Amino acid sequence: MAVNLEDPTHSRNLRDFLLLYNVLTEQCFNSCVKRFHSKNLSRGENDCANLCTDRYVSFNQKLMMTFVENQNKKNKDLEEAMKSSMAPTLLPQSRPSDEQSESDSDKTSFSFVSSNKSRFVTKESKMMTLIPQVLRNERNLCCLFFLLLFSYYITMDVILYVTIQDTTFTDQTRGDSYSMFHPLSAKLVMSDHTNHYFMVPTTEIFDELTRFSKVFFFVTPNMVTITHFILALVAAKFVSSENLKHRRIAVVIYEFRIWLDSLDGVIYRSHAHETVYKSNKSTLGYYMDTTLDVLGGVAFNLGVVFFLFKGAPLISKTQEYILPFCKPAVPTENGVTNGNGEKYTKPSKKFIFWKCWCFGFQIFMASGSWDKRTEQMGEVLETNLKNDAQTTLQTSMLHSFSTWLVMYMWRLCDGQSLFQVFLVVIFMDKVWEFLNFVQYIGYVILISVNVITVVHVNHIKNVIGIK
């Protein structure tokens, strides 16, 4: 329902503004509807069309309700204005000239429209003032959340660095209660931030409070591993949906799967009476957990592939980016052409699969190389040496800033860290942009970190004097 722009009670300026707004929004609306019926809209533009439709109808309805209410209460407002202290500003002074009277009438009408419009939104304004400005939209909430998360990670990293300077990785025993900073191991220090500061602490505290591993002694780590593998399949189904809410549910499910992956390690260490966070490659459970982790990750990535098969944005043959909304598209036989004459087409399934495979192999490469590098760092920093001089050199190398820098790089580049970033971009609906960015540069970073780590481990061996 559109606003009647010919109503003489509206001021000239207001009518001009509404006329311009209606023309622009109606053009945008009609353009989106035409392209929607021609089935040339990308996933993002489809959402834009729906949003434009809703806002166009909602805006006109609200304006119509406001002006109808103003018209019905015009006489009542005039009487209230006469009694109020604002009467001189609301009522025009009489002038002999007809032209001046008409001008004052327009000003009076505009004053009443503004006054009643402000009254119309007063209740909503009072409610909104109770909520801080930063919490009123999704983007600000996300920025605030990641700012707090980043601050938490940095604070914990500072504490971890200071703790390492006062300890060694040999002959450590666990205290009565769990601590994120004792006992430490090369594997724990090289783990990603989310695993070290969220997953492991929460599972350890959960086991301490509920005594889960003791009360439910029949629950084995392999049973938990099978459970989180099933959850990975469920998350893969959700992430393949075109509905953003379903994909966000998939992210939550997969985060819970990662939590269970940490819980099976807690149960294993409790049953094996071990306190140090390290891998035991002599057990069948290690290979079962590794295999199901890989299969679960593959299933989740395939879910993303199927989602992109259905909702990948249009791309250019020269540049790969989302088709801009501001440039009208013209349907052609083989795709869409923008206002500049540049042609856009939907990417092929082979092209989409290649991009997803590049990132998926990066995760596989990062996980495998991380496991190997943590083992090498553990061999040179966690081994008890008989020679006191070698032990002193081993401790000094552990406390060196270069060792901390190498281990910290793996906190940012291991497979779990990459997967956490992937979950974030899925939640933010930026999958395609992320895959384009990380497709090749990720390999350069991983190879560089691996080379630096190998060189540093050999340097430590030469300094200590071990083979």
Image (spheres, rainbow, N blue to C red):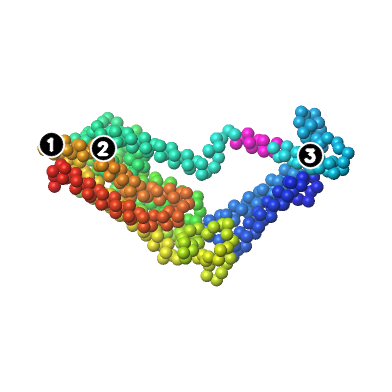
Q: Mark 2, residues whose alpha carbon is within 10 Å: few (<14), some, or many (≥20)?
A: many
Residue in the picture at 69% in, 52% down: 20
Residue in the picture at 67% in, 35% down: 122
Tags 3 and 1 touching, CB below 8 Å? no
Q: CA distance from mark 3 to mark 2?
A: 76 Å
Residue in the picture at 39% in, 62% down: 354
The residue beneath circle 1 is: 389
Question: Depth check: 58 or 176 in front?
Answer: 58
- Residue 149 in percent (x, y) is at 41, 39
The amino acid beneath tag 1 is: Ala
Question: What's the magenta region?
Answer: 119-128
Disc on res. 184: 2
The residue beneath circle 3 is: 108
The amino acid beneath tag 2 is: Leu
Q: Nearer the viewer, mark 3 or mark 2?
A: 3
Disc on res. 263: none
Magenta stretch contains residue 127: yes
Secondary structure beneath label 2 = loop
